[in-house]
Amino acid sequence: MLHPKEIGDRTTIAVMFALKLRGETVLVPFGENVRYDLVADDGRRLSRIQCKTGRLRDGVIRFNVCSSYSHHAKPPVDAKRTYQGQIDEFGVYCPETGTVYRIPIEDVPNDRVATLRVEPARNRQIKHVRLAVMYEVARVDVY
């Protein structure tokens, strides 16, 4: 079993590699006190990206859209922090699909978890469903 830091590092590498495959320049911020993991430059604009590992369960890729400080010895009163106003997109790597997805922050709820649907919903719901294929960047293998 991989350490959570190793999982996060592999996710960041997967997102970086997928962006490079699309011909984008990838910039990495210096230091640890930044809310985004990297910046993508497509030649027209810069985009701050927070990398997250997605998990495929029941036809849906789930990923966190906030950070948690509850594992710290003295967590703040509000142990969950959103990324509103601090990033432009999420870069999500799902090891089960081997795919990187790029999701604008406006497309996800501003609470704890967001989902990308890989398989059709059993109840045939299509309204308010984020289809994974719409956000797909590239398939990569980092495991």
Image (cartoon, rainbow, N blue to C red):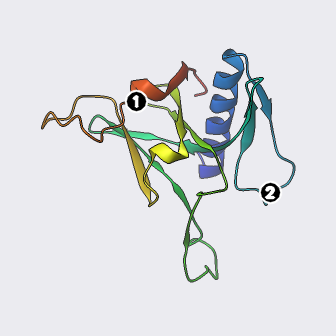
Vertical placement of 24 versus 37: above or below?
A: above
At x 67% / y 16%, what residue is drawn?
A: 21
Q: Position of residue 65 (x, y in %)?
A: 51, 53
- The reply, left or right, for residue 17 in relation to residue 59 is right
| Element on which disc 2 rests | loop
| Residue nearest the observer in this picture, 133 or 46 | 46
Q: Residue at x 64, y 23 (%)?
A: 18
Q: Foreground: 21 or 125? A: 125
Within 10 Å of disc 1 (Cα), the crowding (few <14, some 14-19, many 20+) is some
Q: Residues within 10 Å of mark 2 (few under 14, many from 20)?
A: few
The kind of residue on which mark 1 rests is Ala
Mark 2 vs 1, N-terminal side: 2
Q: Secondary structure at mark 1?
A: helix
Give the label on residue 32, or none. 2
Q: Amino acid at mark 2?
A: Glu
Q: CA distance from mark 2 to mark 1?
A: 30 Å
The residue singled out by tag 1 in the image is: 132
Marks 2, 1: nearer the viewer = 1
Instruction: Name the disc covering residue 1, or none.
Output: none
Q: Position of residue 143 (x, y in %)?
A: 58, 28
Outermost left residue: 123
Q: Residue 47 sits in which quadrant?
A: top right
